[in-house]
Image (tube, rainbow, N blue to C red):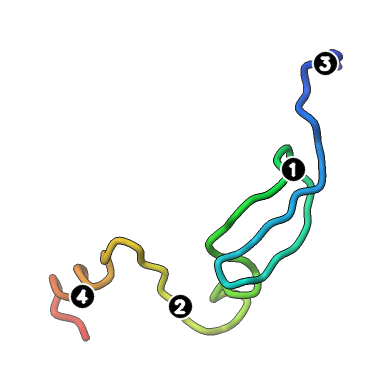
Amino acid sequence: MKKDIHPEYMLCKVICACGNSFETKSTVAERSIDICNECHPFFTGSEKIVDAAGRVEKFKNKYKLS
């Protein structure tokens, strides 16, 4: 490996929108995410729609779904 060309690898604090936080390793010190393993439907077993632009409502209105 060449010397002095690789980024610094450090502990990274990851903060989810649901309030959960954990540490991992990355090239940045802090990172914000929208969905983590504590709030993702696959892990929780509940359906949660993440929609920031109103796309779900637009789709439901277009196809007249409830």
Residue in the foreground of this view, choosing between 1 and 12: 12
Looking at the image, residue 33 lies above or below residue 4: below
| Quadrant in which the N terminus is drawn | top right
Amino acid type at mark 3: Asp
Q: Which residue is mark 1?
A: 26
Looking at the image, residue 12 lies above or below residue 41: above
Residue 48: image tag: 2
- Residue 47 spot, x, y in % from top left: 47, 81
Which sits earlier in the primary sequence, circle 2 or circle 1? 1
Residue 60: image tag: 4
Q: Quadrant of residue 55?
A: bottom left
Amino acid type at mark 4: Lys
Q: Quadrant of residue 22?
A: bottom right
Which sits earlier in the primary sequence, circle 3 or circle 4? 3
Residue at 67% across, 70% down:
20
46 to the left or right of 53 = right
- Residue 62 spot, x, y in % from top left: 13, 70
Q: Which residue is mark 3?
A: 4
Q: Are marks 3 and 4 in contact (CB under 8 Å)?
A: no
Q: Secondary structure at mark 1?
A: strand
| Quadrant in which the C terminus is drawn | bottom left
Residue at 55% across, 66% down:
17
Which sits earlier in the primary sequence, circle 2 or circle 3? 3
